[in-house]
Image (cartoon, grey):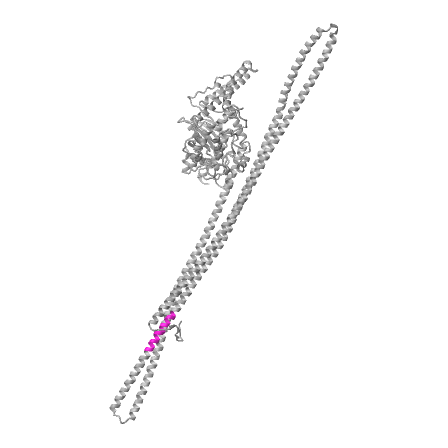
Amino acid sequence: MPSSTRKGGLKDPELTNLFFKDDPEEVFCDLHEIGHGSFGAVYFARNSYSNEVVAIKKMSYNGKQTTEKWQDIIKEVKFLEQLRHPNTIEYKGCYLKDNTAWLVMEYCLGSFAKHRMTLFDTFFFFFFFFFFVEIAAITHGALLGLAYLHSHNMIHRDVKAGNILLTESGQVKLADFGSASIASPANSFVGTPYWMAPEVILAMDEGQYEGKVDVWSLGITCIELAERKPPLFNMNAMSALYHIAQNDSPSLQSNEWSDAFRSFVDYCLLKIPQDRPSSAELLRHEFVRRERPTRVLIDLIQRTKDAVRELDNLQYRKMKKILYQEKHNGPMGESQEEEEVGNKTPAAALIGKMYSLNGPQVASDKSSRDYVDHQYIPDDVPHRDHRSDLRPSSSERAQAHNYKNRERFATIKSASLVTRQIHEHEQENELREQMSGYKRMRRQHQKQLIALENKLKAEMDEHRLKLQKELETHANNAFIELEKLAKKHAIQTDKEMKTLGADEKKFQQQIMAQQKKELTNFLDNQKKQYKLCKEKIKEEMSEDHSTPKKEKQERLSKHKENIQHSQAEEEAQLLGQQRAFYDRNCRAFKRKIMVKRHEFEQEQLREELNKKKTQKEMEHAMLIRQDESTQELEHRQLKTLQKLRMDLIRLQHQTELENQIEYNNRRERELHRKHVLELRQQPKNLKAMELQIKKQFQDTCKVQTKQYKALRHHQLEVTPKSEHKMVLKALKDEQTRKLAILAEQYEQSINEMMASQALRLDEAQEAECQALRQQLQQEMELLNAYQSKIKIQTEAQHEREQQKLEQKVSLRRAHLEQKIEEELASLQKERTDRIKHLLDRQEREIDAFDMESLRMGFNNLCALDYPKDDYR
């Protein structure tokens, strides 16, 4: 792992610039915890140098998932550094101390969820609802912040009332960017379940999402502000995810809200992301553009402060009464009772005021589960602490000392709400850890899929590179072979030309030798004929004795000249014939050499074209083999990816079932504990009711006793004295009988009351058990339906991927076959063209040679017979 990714590793200069090097414990003082969550705790603090009030979010990156925690801290710090907008929380800096990051931000009064929860806790039998204009103001401020984020391709991914803060001046601020994405689109499974958009839940299965997921969360937040809780909040968080993913979008339940508000919420909660508007488009909606008082949020802050102070006074008086009772060790007197009644008057008045403003509403269960927020009150704001008047005990003095140390730091929430939220936070740690584990598992699955996809992509790239190199090697080898063949042809051509030249020269020498021999024989024959003629003439002249000698010599000389002239003409004729024969045969031999050279060129061209064809066929066979290997690899990779996806889905479904079963068992255990507690408390309740019935019968007995005394006195007055004993006995018997009847009625009433209460308790508990079983059964059925739907969708997706791959492979094979056909056709066309071009050129050469031969007087050279020693 690189140094920059190790926990607290600051060797990277870029990471070093993200953190201050000062000791945060020296820079900040007066730290008070004001919130907590899975990330750590949030503190109120004051800068020791500038006296500036800030909020510090402490995040430990020690323990489990150290690297992941450190990366989350780096991501959040980098995200906060980029924010520059009035409707986003202002970032002050970050410090490192003992494996803990101190993230310093501007201090806000608290979230809107806490303003609502504070007033609800103060007047617990009325719900506090935001007014229409207050929701519009909150939504408008949040939209401005979201539009800023989305314009910079950022996504908040955890928009809810608990993450929308309010400053002293009434400025709305988006906060908690721990889940934010610095890039859009994204595909991580992050956020709070009840506020998640459907595409976030299905991101790992169906692809990426954009900033419109924040628009969905804003719509859920509007419902949360209007109805005090988001939809499906009474449902298990896991079940809520399934419900959001496969059911219709939620909407406002009450019809009392304006059409503009209902339209705005419905517009935000369009389930198809493409139909859902962007944050910039929502800023033009009538709901947020409508005019409203400028001090609407400041008035909300003041109402919250007033409610908290009133509850503090009530709690203070209650504690004062308890301490007074403990000090005097006895019941309080009438004066204290009157004081208690008097102390309730302000609260009753404020309750009436709130009731008249908002009207009675229907009760519901607990609201937000986010961290506790507090208020910073400057020196010039009057706030009288009535608890400083008490001095009865050391514990109270310690309490007063604590308030003195707090100085100007005061909470806008009651102590009971703070205590209850801390208790709820501790109780929900198991559920929160379960949800964190589920999110971590989903992210891990996503990482595994991305890692496998990258691995398969790298494998495919390597495979394609290998095939490309194989093709390049084949192309290079083919080019080298063609070059070698061209060189070979050049050598052969040169050799052939030399051979043909030698043959032509030899042929010429052969003709010349033959003609020389013929000329020699001819000359020899001429000499013999000349000699014979000479002898014959001499014989004739010797026989002719009448002719003078001189005349004989003249005749002999003349005859010799005629013979020589005749022989010279014959020799010249022979030489002419030889020259003509030589020229004609040489010309014919040249034509034969040309034809032979043409045949040689044709043979070389056929060899070259055959070589190209062979190479192209080998290349095509290689392409087909490569396509088959690529097809095999693609099918194997798709099978591997789909197998991993199905394995991860099975693991996810198994985890979801285990979490649901664990949730069901926990709900059943909680209900069982509640019923056991009710059964334990029942004897106390029965005892109290028994005492009440007993008191009623005691009152009846007292009345009957008084009536008996009055009747006895009356009877003794009107009855003679002698009959007094008998009258008294009769009255005594009657009184005894009535008391016996009364005692029997008393026992019967007790028995009926106990039987009735036990039956009511059994029926109520049975009804609760039945309702819980039905709810859990519905959630389990919803989970099974969702998992079946996901499995069917995944199988359908796999089928689509298989079909897409088959189509891709088929199309690629068709393109390859078409390419092969086109290349073969091109090669055949090249072959035909080159052969035709060669034959045309050779034909032109033959025609030109024959025309030149014809001009030279040579005709029909191809019909000549060559000498037996033919060198063709």
Which image quarter is the C terminus in?
A: bottom left
The extreme front residue here reads 259
Give the quarter of the image for residue 558: bottom left
Q: Is residue 194 left or right of residue 592?
A: right
Q: Is residue 10 above or below residue 693?
A: below
Is residue 551 in view? yes
The front one of 729 and 678 is 729
The extreme bottom residue here reads 546
* In magenta stretch: residue 846: no
Please provide percent x and percent y for residue 62: 48, 34
The front one of 3 and 368 is 368
Range of the magenta residues? 576-593
The extreme top residue here reads 721
Give the quarter of the image for residue 768: top right
Please provide percent x and percent y for residue 599: 41, 67
Q: Residue at x 54, y 18 (%)?
A: 322
The front one of 124 and 427 is 124
Q: Is residue 8 left or right of residue 744?
A: left
Please provide percent x and percent y for residue 670: 59, 30
* In magenta stretch: residue 584: yes
The extreme left residue here reads 550
Q: How many marks?
A: 0
Please provide percent x and percent y for residue 348: 52, 19
Q: Is residue 488 above or below residue 7?
A: below
Is residue 77 in view? no
Q: Is residue 687 above or below residue 144?
A: above
Give the quarter of the image for residue 612: bottom left
Q: Is residue 800 left or right of residue 708?
A: left
Secondary structure, magenta segment, majority class: helix
